[in-house]
Amino acid sequence: NDGRVVCWIGLPPMQDPKLSATAQRVNRLASEEVGAHPDSFFLDIWTTFSVPGEPGTYTDSVTDVEGNDVIARLDGIHLNTDGSKVLAGYLWPELKDRIPHLPVS
């Protein structure tokens, strides 16, 4: 182990149901593959970027790690700047758990 960690960030639900179904399949396959490799992990954002209580249901707004509602989507597919900040808020603790020597700021 040379200290490197690989993180595969899953896809969020998409506004178009066909794209969303494809994203869900990609997530399943990626999660299985990443799980087979040491020092790798899959960050599942499917539920984070879904309607609360309805995993896989597209929404433009989500709740960030501080409990604020933010508009997170740009075009029904991609995250906007606020959505990327929400993602970073969930990713950072996962990275810190796996890479203890990461700088704090």
Image (spheres, helix red, strand yellow):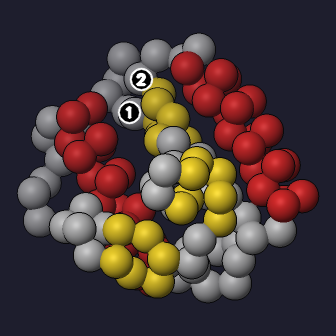
Left or right: 53 as drawn, with respect to 75: left
Up-down relation of residue 28 to residue 105 (above or below): above
Residue 103: where, in percent of width, then height? 13, 54
Q: Is there a contact, CB below 8 Å, between mark 1 and mark 2?
A: yes
- Label tally: 2
Left or right: 98 as drawn, with respect to 20: left
Tell me if I can see residue 9 in this picture: no
Q: Please state which of residues 35 and 54 is positioned toward the viewer in this rendering.
A: 54
Left or right: 76 as drawn, with respect to 51: right
Up-down relation of residue 11 to residue 2 (above or below): below
Residue at x 35% of width, y 62% of height: 88
The residue lying furthest to the left in this view is 104
| Quadrant assignment, res 90 | bottom left
Residue 35: where, in percent of width, then height? 55, 20
Q: Please state which of residues 102 and 24 is positioned toward the viewer in this rendering.
A: 24
Q: Which residue is mark 2?
A: 39
Residue 70: where, in percent of width, then height? 39, 81
Q: CA distance from mark 1 to mark 2?
A: 7 Å
Left or right: 19 as drawn, with respect to 94: right
Amino acid type shown at disc 1: Arg
Residue at x 65% of width, y 22% of height: 32
Residue at x 54% of width, y 62% of height: 51
Residue 4: assigned label: 1
Q: Please state which of residues 63 and 7 is positioned toward the viewer in this rendering.
A: 63
Residue 67: assigned label: none
Tell me if I can see residue 37 in this picture: yes
Query: Which is in the foreground here, disc 1 or disc 2?
Result: 2
Amino acid type shown at disc 2: Asp
